[in-house]
Image (cartoon, rainbow, N blue to C red):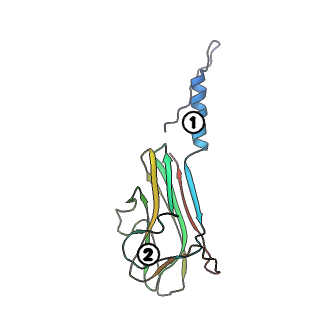
Amino acid sequence: MTITFPVATASPAGLIKSTDWNNLRDSIGYLLNRPSQSIILDHGADYTNNVIGWADIDATSLKITLANKGSLVYVYFSGVVLSAASSGVFFDFTLNGARVGAAGANGLAGVSASGATTTKTTLSFGSFVAVSPGSNVFKVQWNPQTAAVMTLFGGAGVSPTDYMIQFAAVEVA
């Protein structure tokens, strides 16, 4: 969306037209009401994965669809991960099915373990993503480094592993 502000030169006979005021109103309205969605997921169960290869963590609950007017979206993810001994797991976003960090084999972020199987790590990452105006779908994916079991805590309701997942997207330009 192009934001335009009316420019009027004051003069004794000058008028600011209704279209100028409407453009100003619409531009301010867009700035205050940008397309956005935020998920704080209390899934009631943890996610596990031991299959090497990029896959959606949850194609239904961790899916954001935005009707964008602009061309740039900030996408954010946060969760607590337990990776198996001497292994790790990589994370990325998809935009309409294509991985955003596909230029790197390991995606946009990762967590590694150094031998301890009980070490929990908080992973938070975000990325500015170029989009086309219209409906765009974002999902979070992961890819274990080895066939060892990786866990993403999803609010299973049992302390000390009752963590929730955050996933958000907001149009910024």
Decide which of 25, 67 is in the foreground and name it: 67
Identify which amino acid the numbered label 1 is placed on: Ser
Picture residue at 48% right of the left edge, 80% below the top = 83
Neighbours of disc 1 within 10 Å: few (<14), some (14-19), many (20+): some
Circle count? 2
Picture residue at 41% right of the left edge, 69% below the top = 55
Decide which of 51, 74 is in the foreground and name it: 51
Q: Position of residue 167 (x, y in %)?
A: 54, 62
Picture residue at 40% right of the left edge, 59% below the top = 100
Can you say whether 61 is above or below 53 in the image?
A: above
Do the residues bearing badges 2 and 1 touch, measured as CB atoms within 8 Å? no
Neighbours of disc 2 within 10 Å: few (<14), some (14-19), many (20+): many
Decide which of 76, 37 is in the foreground and name it: 37
Q: CA distance from mark 2 to mark 1?
A: 42 Å
Identify which amino acid the numbered label 2 is placed on: Val
Q: Position of residue 22 (x, y in %)?
A: 59, 28
Decide which of 17, 151 is in the foreground and name it: 151
Can you say whether 161 is above or below 24 in the image?
A: below
Mark closest to the chain's N terminus, 2 or 1: 1
Image side of residue 19 versus residue 93, left or right = right
Q: Which residue is mark 1?
A: 27
Q: Which residue is mark 2?
A: 89
Q: Position of residue 131 (x, y in %)?
A: 43, 49
